[in-house]
Image (cartoon, rainbow, N blue to C red):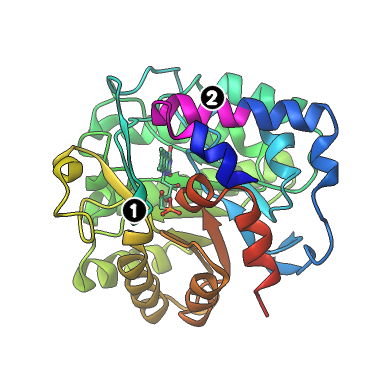
Amino acid sequence: MYKFIRYFLFKLDPERAHILSLKLLKLAHQLYLTKLLPKRDMKKPAKVFGLNFMNPVGIAAGFDDNGDYIDALASLGCGFIEIGTVTPKPQAGNKKPRLIRFPKQRALINRMGFNNKGVEHLIQQVKKAKYKGIIGINIGKNLVTDLDRAIDDYRHCLQKVYPYASYVAINISSPNTPQLRQLQYDNYLESLIAELKNQQVKLAKVHDCYVPLIVKVAPDLNDEQITSMSAILTQHKIDGIIAVNTSLSRQGIEHLAQAQEAGGMSGETLFPQALHVVSQFRRCLPDDIPIIACGGISSADDANKMLAAGASLIQVYTGLIYQGPQLIRRIVTGLP
Ligand SMILES: Cc1cc2nc3c(=O)[nH]c(=O)nc-3n(C[C@H](O)[C@H](O)[C@H](O)COP(=O)(O)O)c2cc1C
């Protein structure tokens, strides 16, 4: 069925096709058609970060930037949904076209640049949603905010989303906001995480609820950088990490003309790099800091490799574009 729909979707510009698919899914959900999807075997409960997940397979950030499709996505049977990246103010993102498909390799390059309607809109959408499962909210900084003031944007978003999120993901790894990845290193990382953990203590008292803080990391880190990031994250008692965001590498698509387009690569060609980074972080982080694995996961076999490498949860994005919503069920039912 999805192969048939995909045939038409792939004739459209990739970004338009993505928005159209989400709108069709929302319509199908409103017409109760998604109730026809098999629900059997979708319960594989997992307790991570002190939260109860129906199953360990979630939808990664950027799929629903603004939280406009929460209930429709939840009807696919995923164990959690991460919405965002959201910034304090709405912003348009980079010039279009900014999303490229590599169908044979089942990969994408995107340079979206945090196009989103801003944190106030996202909160309204979360409030409206009927879904009662796990929602992660992924936060970032506006393009116009200097790196030295980035903390202000993250603090603002954290304060706003805290009462509505099951966990908050701190995105310091998108390759499409200039210099953002600098926040992964040394003094920048140290001061950002110290401040946000400080805020978390205050917010936990105000809202009488502890919301885990999770850092999303890039795949383009060498082993030395992973070691020093892990030391800082451990010292500040981060609650978890998501590994990984999109990559600057072009491994697997390097021979193709459009491979030189700016942006981050995702999809099956990212999987080996993502698996390596997950294993390295697992080696460097204490056992009580869980890892959400993301990057090119496109089968239950991939998911099981990530779990064997030490991940506790799985996220998918590009696999959904190429395989459709059945991918979630295929992975969940293939987990032990
Ligand atoms: C079009 C597109 C937009 C994305 N937007 C975001 C984003 O806003 N924030 C974020 O943390 N990750 C974003 N990502 C990265 C994904 O969440 C994920 O980390 C990455 O694509 C690797 O997983 P995959 O190979 O399963 O797609 C985006 C990815 C794509 C393809």
Q: Position of residue 82 (x, y in %)?
A: 58, 45
Let me know if residue 130 appears in the view.
yes
User: 193 and 302: which one is in front?
Assistant: 302
Identify residue type, mark 1. Lys
Q: Horizontal and vertical percent for residue 106?
A: 38, 53
- Side (left or right) of 201 relative to 115: right
Q: Residue at x 38, y 71 (%)?
A: 275
Quadrant housing residue 235: bottom left
Cβ of mark 2 under 8 Å from ligand 1: the answer is no
- Read off the residue under disc 2: 119
Ligand 1 located in image quadrant: top left
Q: Position of residue 120 (x, y in %)?
A: 58, 20
User: Which amino acid, by three-letter code, is at mark 2?
Assistant: Val
In which quadrant of the rendered view does residue 229 lie?
bottom left
**How far apart are the alpha carbons under marks 2 and 1?**
37 Å
Residue 141 in the image, given as x and y percentages of width and height? 37, 31
Indicate the secondary structure of the residue bearing disc 1.
helix
Q: Earlier in the sequence, mark 2 or mark 1?
A: 1
Say which residue appears at 43% left-offset and 26% top-offset.
12
Instruction: Please provide the residue range marked out in magenta.
Output: 9-22
Q: Is residue 16 magenta?
A: yes
Few, some or many residues within 10 Å of mark 2 (<14, 14–19, 20+): many
The residue that mark 1 highlights is: 104
Residue 238 in sight: no
**Residue 90 versus residue 214 in the image, above or below:** above
What is the crowding at mark 1: few (fewer than 14 residues within 10 Å), some, or many (at least 20)?
few
Secondary structure type for disc 2 = helix
97 and 103: which one is in front? 103
Q: Is 95 a magenta residue?
A: no
Residue at 44 percent across and 18 percent down: it is 89
